[in-house]
C-alpha cells in the first residue's frame, strides 16, 4: 500500500509539469493491462509494480474527473441565461453594491433532471441604482435568474490562480444576477454555521480581535488589507486559519476530560471508547464549522483512522498513515494537487514525524522549551524551500514571532476562545468581562500583526527558478537530521545553490551599481482596464492603477500583490492617464502603502500639485516624455489622455492611454524626434476608433500589446484593429490571452515573456 501511495503522490507532482494529460480511453486500457500482467512480472520488477499502478490510477482519476468537470461546465455556460434553483452553501460576503456566495444546484426548478445537480456555482448579485440587496444567508434556498460565464481569472505573478482554485473548490461556472425582480426566496432556513456566525457577530463584533476570533471558530476571515499583509509578513497564516493543528488541539483538550467520564460508572473499555468517540465527534464538529477546509478534512480523517486503529488494538506510524491518507484523498478529488494547503499540511505532518523521531520527548520544563524552540527552527528552515517555491519569497520574522506568540495562542488564546465559543453556542449567558479579557489576551498578536504589516517583513525572490528552491531541500534535510560527516556533506550541496539565491536577490533589490540592474516593463493583466510598471531593482514607476468600482479594485487585488511579489519598496512616480475608473483605480489605497509616491496626473481631485507635463524628463537613466493631444482639462476624458513615451536609449515604448481620434497629434510629435517606436500599448484597449492605419504607419511599432478583459462586452481588441496590425505584420499580445506581459528592456534583442503559458499544468489552460 505504501508503494501504491508513493506512485499516486509522484504522479500528482508529475501532472503539474505535463503539457497535456493522457487521453482517457488509452490510459484506461494501459491501467487494465498493468493489472493483467502483474502475475507475469519477475520478482525484482514486481516491487515497482504497485508504484506504477498508483501513478496510472491517479492519472486515470484526474483525466476522468477533468473530462466530467469540463463537460458539465460547458453545458452550463452554453445556456448563458437561465433560471436556477439551489441552496447557499457558503457564508455570503455582503457589500453595499453586491453580494457574493456559492450556490449548490438543485432540480427544484427543472422539468427534467439536471446534469449539474449537486454542483457548485459562484454567484455575484449586483445592486441596481437605488436598490437594496436582500440579506443572503447560508442554508437558504433561492430561485435566481442568472447569466453564466466560464471561470476565468486574471493571470499575474503574485495573484491567485483562479481556474485552479475553482477546480479545487468544485466550482463549475460563474453566475451574475443584476435584478431581484424575479428572484424568489424558496426557504429561509439558515444553516447551523450561519446561525452561529450571526450569534457570534451580535455578541462580539465590536471587539478589535473579532476578525481573528471568527477565523479561529467559524473559519471565515474578513480581514482588512492591512491585517492580511501583517499575517503574510509574520508568517502566521497557519495560526489564523483552522488547520490540523487546531483540530488536534481541540481533540487533545477533549481527552483532558478523562476524569469526568469516570462519574458515568462505565467499565474501563467502554469508558475509553466513549472518551475517544466524544473527542472525535467534537473534532468533526469543529471541521464542519470551518466548512471542511482541506487541512481540517485531512486532520479529522487522520484522527478517525487513529481512533479506529486504537480501538482495534492496532498500531501504525504517523508517517505511514499520512502517506496513505494523502494518496486516498488525491484519488477521491484529484484536483487537490493545485491546493497549496494540501501540500503544506502533508509536508508539515511529514516534518513533524521526522522531528519527533529525531528529538524524542524528555521529561521536564526546560527540555520541553528547548524542544519547542528546536521544532520551530526546524519548521522555519525546512519549509523555507516550499515558501520560495510556492510564494517566491519568505518571511524573515516568522521564526521569532511564532516562537514568542505561538505558545501564548496555543496554551491560552485558542483554548479559551474555543471554550467561550462553545459556551456561546449552548447559551447566550457568556459574561461580558470574559470577552473583554479575551480581547486583552489577543492584544499582543494584533500588535505584532500591525507591526509586521508596516515593517519590511517580506523577502521577495521573484527571479529564483523553481529548481533552485527544490535544490535547497536536500542540503537542509542532510544538515538538520544527520550527524558527523554526513552533516558536513550538506555544505558542498549548498554551494551550487548560493549563486541562484544571490542572483535572484540582486534582481529584486537595490544592491549593486545602477547601470548593472536590469530594466523591465510589465503590462499587468487587470481585465478591462490598464496598469503598467517600469521597474529597475526595487524602484518603479506605475502607469495607471487598473479598474476600481464598488467592491472590485484591481489596485488591491492585482497591483499591490504584484508590487509585493517583485519586491518594490519605492514607487517614485504614479502616472494616471485620465479620469476613467478603468485607469484611475484606487489611488488612496496605493498611497497608504507607498506614501512617498509622487502622483503625476491632470486629474485635479487626485493630483492638485503635479499635472501631466510635470513628469520628470529622466528617471534612473531612462528618458520620459509626456504628451497631450488637446488643451488641459481638470477632469480629462479619453481624448484628453496623458500619453507617455519611454526611451531607454535602446528601445522606445508608447503608452497612449485611451487616445483615439486625436492620436495623430501625438504621433506627429514623436516622429519629429524619432523614426519610430519599438512597442506600442494599444490605445483604448484596442478599440476600432484607436490605432488607425495612419497612426501605425507613422510610428512603425515592432510589437503591439493590448490590455483587455477576456471576452469583454466591447469586443476589444477590435477586429478592425487586429486587421490593421496584421496588414502591417505587427505581432499582437493580448493580456486576456497572454496574462501579464514582461519586456526585458536591458537585453540586446527585444525579449518578452507571457505569464499565462509559463504557469504549471499547461493542460489546464488548454
Image: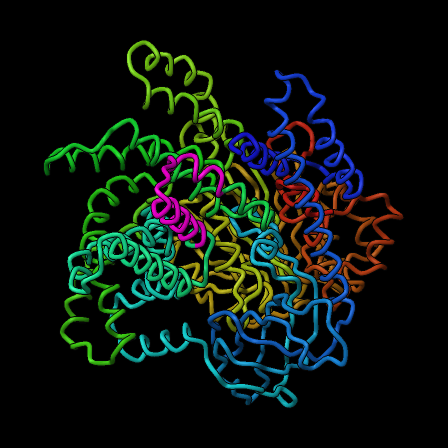
Percent across and percent down for residue 478 are: 37, 20
Is residue 41 depicted above or below 50 in this figure? above
Is residue 204 depicted above or below 674 in this figure? below
- Say how the picture is coloured: rainbow
Name the residue located 48 percent from the left edge and 32 percent from the top edge: 507
| Quarter occupied by residue 170 | bottom right
Name the residue located 44 percent from the left edge and 50 percent from the top edge: 298
Percent across and percent down for residue 363 are: 13, 34
Name the foreground residue: 624 vs 296.
296
User: Magenta segment: does it hold 669?
Assistant: no
Q: Is residue 625 visible?
A: no
Name the foreground residue: 236 vs 419.
419
Name the residue located 37 percent from the left edge and 31 percent from the top edge: 382
Name the residue located 55 percent from the left edge and 39 percent from the top edge: 622
Percent across and percent down for residue 557 are: 51, 58
User: Magenta segment: does it hold 300?
Assistant: yes
Name the foreground residue: 456 vs 428.
428
Percent across and percent down for residue 640 are: 64, 66
Residues in magenta, as a range: 297-325
Task: List the single residue furthest toward the front.
Answer: 267
Amino acid at each position: 500500500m505504501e508503494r501504491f501511495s508513493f506512485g499516486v503522490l509522484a504522479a500528482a507532482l508529475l501532472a503539474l509539469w505535463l503539457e497535456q494529460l493522457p487521453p482517457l480511453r488509452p490510459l484506461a486500457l494501459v491501467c487494465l493491462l498493468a493489472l493483467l500482467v502483474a502475475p507475469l512480472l519477475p520478482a525484482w520488477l514486481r516491487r515497482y509494480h504497485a508504484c506504477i499502478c498508483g501513478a496510472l490510477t491517479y492519472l486515470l482519476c484526474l483525466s476522468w474527473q477533468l473530462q466530467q468537470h469540463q463537460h458539465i461546465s460547458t453545458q452550463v455556460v452554453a445556456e448563458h441565461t437561465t433560471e436556477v434553483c439551489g441552496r447557499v452553501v457558503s457564508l455570503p460576503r455582503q457589500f453595499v453594491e453586491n453580494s457574493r456566495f456559492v450556490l449548490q444546484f438543485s432540480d427544484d426548478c427543472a422539468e427534467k433532471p439536471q446534469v449539474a445537480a449537486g454542483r457548485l456555482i459562484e454567484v455575484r448579485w449586483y445592486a441596481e441604482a437605488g436598490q437594496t440587496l436582500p440579506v443572503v444567508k447560508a442554508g437558504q434556498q433561492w430561485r435566481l435568474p442568472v447569466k453564466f460565464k466560464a471561470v476565468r481569472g486574471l493571470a499575474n505573478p503574485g495573484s491567485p490562480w483562479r481556474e485552479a482554485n475553482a477546480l479545487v473548490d468544485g466550482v463549475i461556472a460563474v453566475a451574475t444576477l443584476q435584478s431581484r425582480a424575479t428572484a424568489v426566496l424558496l426557504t429561509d432556513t439558515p444553516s447551523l454555521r450561519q446561525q452561529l456566525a450571526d450569534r457570534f457577530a451580535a455578541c462580539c463584533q465590536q471587539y478589535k480581535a473579532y476578525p481573528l476570533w471568527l477565523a479561529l471558530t467559524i473559519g471565515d476571515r474578513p480581514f482588512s488589507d492591512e491585517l492580511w499583509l501583517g499575517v503574510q509578513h509574520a508568517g502566521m497564516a497557519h495560526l489564523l486559519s483552522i488547520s490540523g493543528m487546531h483540530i488536534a488541539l481541540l481533540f487533545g483538550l477533549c481527552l483532558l476530560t478523562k476524569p469526568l467520564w469516570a462519574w458515568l460508572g462505565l467499565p474501563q473499555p467502554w469508558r475509553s471508547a466513549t472518551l475517544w468517540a466524544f473527542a472525535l465527534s467534537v473534532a468533526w464538529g469543529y471541521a464542519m464549522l470551518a466548512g471542511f477546509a482541506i487541512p481540517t478534512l485531512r486532520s479529522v480523517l487522520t484522527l478517525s483512522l487513529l481512533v479506529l486503529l486504537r480501538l482495534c488494538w492496532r498500531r501504525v506510524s504517523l508517517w505511514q498513515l499520512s502517506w496513505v491518507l494523502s494518496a486516498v484523498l488525491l484519488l477521491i478529488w484529484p484536483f487537490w494537487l493545485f491546493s497549496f494547503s494540501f501540500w503544506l499540511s502533508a509536508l508539515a505532518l511529514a516534518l513533524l514525524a521526522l522531528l519527533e523521531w529525531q528529538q524524542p520527548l524528555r521529561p521536564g520544563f526546560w527540555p520541553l522549551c528547548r524542544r519547542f524552540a528546536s521544532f520551530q527552527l526546524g519548521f522555519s528552515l525546512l519549509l523555507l524551500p516550499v515558501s520560495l517555491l510556492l510564494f517566491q519569497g519568505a518571511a524573515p520574522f516568522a521564526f521569532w514571532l511564532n516562537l514568542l506568540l505561538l505558545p501564548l495562542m496555543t496554551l491560552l488564546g485558542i483554548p479559551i476562545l474555543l471554550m467561550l465559543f462553545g459556551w456561546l453556542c449552548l447559551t447566550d449567558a457568556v459574561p461580558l468581562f470574559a470577552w473583554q479579557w479575551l480581547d486583552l489576551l489577543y492584544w499582543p498578536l494584533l500588535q505584532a500583526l500591525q507591526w509586521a504589516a508596516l515593517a519590511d517583513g517580506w523577502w521577495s525572490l521573484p527571479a529564483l527558478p523553481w529548481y533552485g528552491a527544490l535544490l535547497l531541500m536536500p542540503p537542509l534535510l542532510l544538515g538538520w537530521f544527520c550527524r558527523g560527516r554526513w552533516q558536513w556533506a550538506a555544505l558542498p550541496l549548498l554551494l551550487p545553490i548560493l549563486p541562484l539565491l544571490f542572483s535572484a536577490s540582486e534582481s529584486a533589490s537595490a544592491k549593486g551599481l545602477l547601470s548593472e540592474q536590469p530594466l523591465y516593463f510589465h503590462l499587468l493583466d487587470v481585465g478591462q482596464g490598464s496598469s503598467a510598471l517600469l521597474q529597475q531593482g526595487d524602484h518603479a514607476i506605475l502607469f495607471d492603477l487598473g479598474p476600481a468600482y464598488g467592491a472590485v479594485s484591481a489596485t488591491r487585488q492585482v497591483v499591490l500583490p504584484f508590487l509585493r511579489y517583485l519586491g518594490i519598496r519605492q514607487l517614485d512616480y504614479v502616472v494616471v492617464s485620465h479620469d476613467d475608473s478603468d485607469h484611475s483605480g484606487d489611488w488612496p489605497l496605493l498611497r497608504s502603502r507607498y506614501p512617498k509616491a509622487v502622483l503625476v496626473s491632470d486629474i485635479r481631485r487626485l493630483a492638485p500639485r503635479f499635472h501631466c507635463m510635470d513628469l520628470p524628463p529622466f528617471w534612473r537613466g531612462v528618458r520620459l516624455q509626456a504628451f497631450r493631444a488637446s488643451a488641459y482639462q481638470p477632469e480629462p476624458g479619453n481624448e484628453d489622455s496623458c500619453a507617455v513615451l519611454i526611451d531607454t536609449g535602446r528601445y522606445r515604448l508608447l503608452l497612449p492611454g485611451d487616445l483615439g481620434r486625436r492620436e495623430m497629434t501625438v504621433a506627429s510629435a514623436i516622429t519629429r524626434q524619432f523614426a519610430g517606436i519599438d512597442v506600442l500599448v494599444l490605445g483604448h484597449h484596442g478599440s476600432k476608433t484607436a490605432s488607425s492605419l495612419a497612426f501605425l504607419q507613422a510610428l512603425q511599432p515592432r510589437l503591439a500589446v493590448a490590455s483587455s478583459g477576456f471576452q469583454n462586452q466591447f469586443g476589444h481588441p477590435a477586429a478592425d484593429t487586429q486587421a490593421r496590425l496584421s496588414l502591417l505584420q505587427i505581432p499582437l499580445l493580448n493580456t486576456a490571452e497572454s496574462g501579464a506581459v514582461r519586456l526585458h528592456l536591458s537585453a540586446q534583442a527585444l525579449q518578452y515573456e507571457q505569464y499565462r503559458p509559463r504557469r504549471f499544468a499547461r493542460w489546464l489552460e488548454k
